[in-house]
Image (cartoon, rainbow, N blue to C red):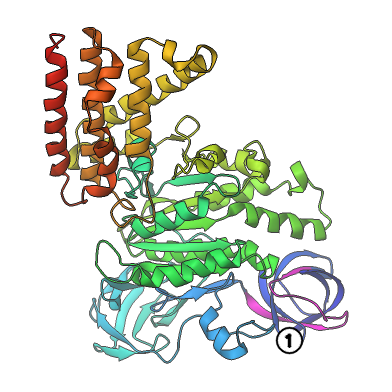
Amino acid sequence: MEVGKITWISGPVVKVRISSPLQMLEQVEVSDMHLVGEVLSIRGDEATIQVYEETEGIKPGAPVYGSGAPLAVELGPGLIGRIFDGIQRPLKDLAALSGAFIQRGFTAAPLSRETKWHFSPSVSIGTALTPGQVWGVVPETANLQHRLMLPPNVSGTVTWLANEGDYTIDTPLVKLSTVQGEVTCSMLQRWPVRQPRPIRERVAPSEPLLTGQRVIDILFPIAKGGTAAIPGGFGAGKTVLQHALAKWSDADIVVYIGCGERGNEMTDVLIEFPKLQDPRTGRSLMERTILVANTSNMPVAAREASIYTGITLAEYYRDMGYAVALMADSTSRWAEALREVSGRLEEMPAEEGFPAYLPSRLAAFYERAGRVTTLAGNTGSVTVVGAISPPSADFSEPVTQHTQRFVRVFWALDKDLAAARHFPSINWLSSYSGYRDDISAWWGAHQAPDWQDLGKQMMAILQQESSLLDIAKLVGQDTLPDMERFILLIARTIKEAFLQQNAMDPVDAYSSPAKQVALVRLLLHIYDRGRKIIEQGCPVGRLQNEMDLWPEIVRARATVPNDQPELLQELRTRVDAKLNVIGKDYGA
């Protein structure tokens, strides 16, 4: 239905003279090209609309059509393995319709109406269902069961139920008697992207999101349901680190949002991910991944919507009881889209031209992360990791500063480390994690009772090295006492053998928890033994030269398979043999 005509156009923002009822955040179609838009404000008989496609060629007087509903996503079987744009249009389907370059006004259903899915009911006639309760299941992939849930605002008693079989997503499968009357449900749901899905309660995080990245899992861990930020300048390795997290984390589902990033980076993801093997299942990584691609050359307004689309998809699978990891790359580009639209709305700018509501928008986004008890009583989680691209690696800029207020993990990437080919380039002196105490019990029960102490001891060595390097710059490293030179030697070994990790190496790309703990124990054991020998008068040069296993210790991260951490114990035995020979001369 036509709701008005355009009176003013400024890039992705248009103003409309209203002729029929219109509501805030309603999804609309602009002009006879039916460009997708969303109502941002209504003042009197004038509405301001954000258009998610290019407005070139649109003229004042063009009609605007209302939908009567907010911008929403389709939820149901078929989401996994798909690639969507910022407003959930399937890119492969659009490419088939319009060619390599997507033309304006083209659209396609996010979920196929022709594909049939095998439905198995999990309730029976007469069952009383509450909001969010599972009433059937569908095998979405070989290792992922899609749980069909009652919408959050529906409850009632089952009066009819389809038999087990193959159905399309819009086929009625269950009927309920409710206080409002009879309600029919299919596999398909819709949910407004800007409205968080309801939960029963939040649960304190207690289980780590294992990433396979040693510097993260041991020193700066994140919990399932946690929030993290990855700030770093150009070339510091943000995208590669997020790719590694998406590939190797032990989340059940991964939602990867390419928000305003370069097209070639998203192309790498689209080409690489289908070829990668999930370490847990041995099948394609795309069988647990959803991609939302909104590159820098796509309409800027759709970039603003993309993170809401992605997190709504994540919440949907969370409500099934799954652990979901969401990667947003990058929130700086999202904030720039906010700034551009805000400028065209002629709003008063705040710091560096960003709108005054930037902090509240960031807070609302990260607040949708968490470990929760769902409406049906299951436990699920959404972990949010947002990359930040501060200009000139300036962490004092507004997006980084405001994000830091709302996240509990801060992985600060260092350009100097990246220039020295040290990856991941996480600066161990600037980064932190607020989840260590929350997840230490899990590590104690599953891997190492002293996990907390292992991380603290390693950080203490690295912090001592930082202080000693400042002194060494003034007086020279050779003038330092033997004990201090030994600390520098061990710290360098820790950086090379533990903190560095090669994302391209078939072994080193992922490090199992057992291997991580064994490697930490080996390095700290060498530190303890060497310190005692030096205290008895041994010069550090002898330890460095006669203990000829240092190169093998460094290479162990790539030569010891993840399923054979006992090989590190064998290496430790050989190290002890060397140290015993040296220490014997000094009574140590």
| Residue 138, position as x, y percentages in the image | 29, 78
62 is within the stretch colored magenta = yes
Question: Which image quarter holds the C terminus?
Answer: top left
Q: Residue at x 24, y 66 (%)?
A: 281
307 is within the stretch colored magenta = no
The stretch of residues the image draws in magenta is 48-69
* Residue 334 visible, this angle: yes
Mark 1, residue position: 33
> Is 515 in front, or is 423?
423
- Kind of residue at badge 1: Met
* Residue 374 visible, this angle: no
Q: Residue at x 43, y 87 (%)?
A: 170
Q: How many marks?
A: 1
Residue 155 in the figure: left or right of residue 283: right
Q: Residue at x 31, y 31 (%)?
A: 455
Q: Above or below — where is 226 with respect to 39? A: above
Residue 507 in the figure: left or right of residue 404: left
Question: Which image quarter holds the N terminus?
Answer: bottom right
Q: Residue at x 55, y 74 (%)?
A: 88
Asked which quadrant contains residue 531, the reply is: top left
Q: Secondary structure at mark 1?
A: loop
Residue 463 in the figure: left or right of residue 14: left
| Residue 76, position as x, y percentages in the image | 41, 77
Q: Is the residue marked by circle 1 packed among few (<14), some (14-19), or many (20+) residues within 10 Å?
A: some
| Residue 130, position as x, y percentages in the image | 34, 67
Q: Above or below — where is 523 with respect to 213? A: above
> Is 131 in front, or is 344?
344
> Is 504 in front, or is 348?
504
| Residue 461, position as x, y percentages in the image | 36, 23
Asked which quadrant contains residue 277, the reply is: bottom left
